Image (tube, rainbow, N blue to C red):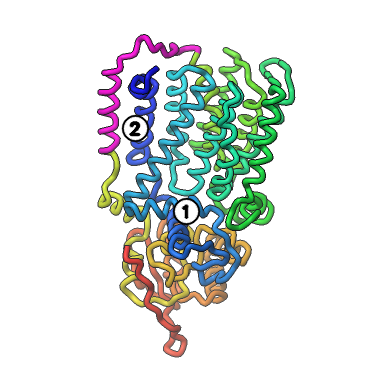
Amino acid sequence: MSRFRLFASFPVLLATTLAAGVVLFNTHGGGRMFEEGDTWWHVSTGEQILATGGFPHADPYSFSAPGVPWLAYEWLGEVAMAEAEHFGSLRGLAILLALNSVTLVLLTYIYAWLRTRNVLAAAAAVALLLPFEQLAFTLRPQMFGYVFIVVTLVVLELYKQRESRLIWSLPGIFALWVNTHGSFIVGLAIVFWYGFSGLFGFRAGAVIASKWTSSGRVRLLTVMLLCSIALFVTPYGGRLAAYPLELFSMQPLNTLFIPEWQPLELQAPLGRAFLLLLLGWLLAQILVPVKYELEVLVPILFAAYLTCMHRRFLPIFLVILTPVIATYLARLLPTYEESKERYAMNIVLMAVTLFFVIGLIPTTARLEKEMERELPVGAVTYLRDHPMPTRMFNDDHWGGFLIWSLGSRHKVFIDGRLDIYEYSGVLEDYIRIVADPKYAKEVFRKYKIEACLVNREGQSDLVSTISHDPAWKTAYSDAQSVIFLRDLKPQEQPEITQLGVSGR
């Protein structure tokens, strides 16, 4: 097939349609650019690295844990986010989110096609799971991690089918991945499992294991060794490679407090949908059984288990499950036939689709309005215009936005970098307040809190507690947030500092 025919082919038309669906989800059907509080401190960290040319080793953003050792574990993803913001401010960030989401979905489509050789089945499976996969469409470095996982699966599948030389790209991929997001540990486990499963050759019911050739096994073992070495190619040596182990072994409050790390609730809509997927898969296997390669089956089952334990793993499970769904659909849908192509019609449809996609990209004005609905923009504007005590308590979800909006002169109480706050004891104190506001007075005294920015909806009990305390007065209030100031006696007045303005 010529290059022109390839780009004008029906499989590319399907890819274009899937991309349009992803952008639609991002812009109208559930894109969560402004719902994720961590986005903003990630951008600020990337900006700091670009501005200084160095990498942080201690916390520069808080007054509650000043100087606590902190590493930018996801610095490469954060730099990419900062560059996107420099390119186009909010619109640049929105475009980066759309590009990451489209890349993830199209790579999943390619992976499903490689496994089934049926483009219709692959596209249908991706479209079927897209409403669930869009939960991963948030602007954080972990989005890059999901992309790396699918890239790894595609490279391994190509190597399995024809011992592709692309296998030698994996060490470079892991060198980038370890500097971008901690999900590299999942990719490394998949690579090692592929290597291990290729040591056997057997058939047991629906499970098949095929041995690698001697040369293929040697190459894969060499690549595995190089991937392991690549994890040390970071500005922090081996610290980034060790971080996933550090997270699970030394941060129990972090994994307990963050909703993504909590078990999937089977009574909730998402949990029920996940359960229906599993039951549907089981029923399909009973009615029309298919064969599973050992290197594929175990990761699916393990990803299902991890999703039950931590909902954060759902996107990974969906990526691995997509080719399985496509395998069943391939029995119902016809295969692609190049002889039936209508290239001119494909080009027209792709042009219309791309025009539609461009029209979906939100304007800066619209993004600013969405930001006002999701984040305390009014409160931040007030803080810019009025002198405030420097020790202000804030919602953890809003801490990153305060860092991004007000600049380095304003120090936050807490933000999404919960590892340093757990090590310093701040997270435990914060959880005490969130769980029971009666502890607020004790914690405020401990940290010498003189102001509070509180979420009306998410922290309504705390708002009520502070508002009924005569020691506090309301300085600012809107439908989203309240700023309280401690009503001090003259001799108790703290030094007032004008908060820095970022110029955004």
Residue at position x 36%, y 77% from top? 387
Figure check: 320 above or below 67: above
Secondary structure beneath label 2: helix
352 part of magenta stretch: yes
327 horizontally vs 36: left or right: right
Which secondary structure is most common in the magenta stretch?
helix
Neighbor class of circle 2 (other Cα within 10 Å; few <14, some 14-19, many 20+) is: many
Residue at position x 36%, y 59% from top? 480
Q: Label 2 sits on what residue type?
A: Ala
Coordinates of residue 197 in the picture (x, y in percent): 70, 27
Figure check: 392 above or below 415: below
Q: Label 1 sits on what residue type?
A: Glu
Residue at mark 1? 78
Would you identify the image quadrant in which residue 419 lies?
A: bottom right
Of the 4 image quadrants, the one containing the N terminus is top left
Coordinates of residue 198 in the picture (x, y in percent): 70, 25
- Residue closer to the observer: 317 or 457: 317
162 part of magenta stretch: no
Residue at position x 55%, y 41% from top? 173
Residue 470 in sight in this render? no
Secondary structure beneath label 1: helix
Asked if the residues shown at circle 1 and circle 2 are in contact, with their CB atoms under 8 angstroms apart, the answer is: no
Residue 372's disc is none
Coordinates of residue 98 in the picture (x, y in percent): 38, 41
Residue at mark 2? 20
Would you identify the image quadrant in which residue 294 lies?
A: top right
Question: N-terminal of the two: label 1 or label 2?
Answer: 2
Q: Which residues are magenta?
A: 331-359
Figure check: 85 above or below 19: below
Neighbor class of circle 1 (other Cα within 10 Å; few <14, some 14-19, many 20+) is: many
161 horizontally vs 337: left or right: right
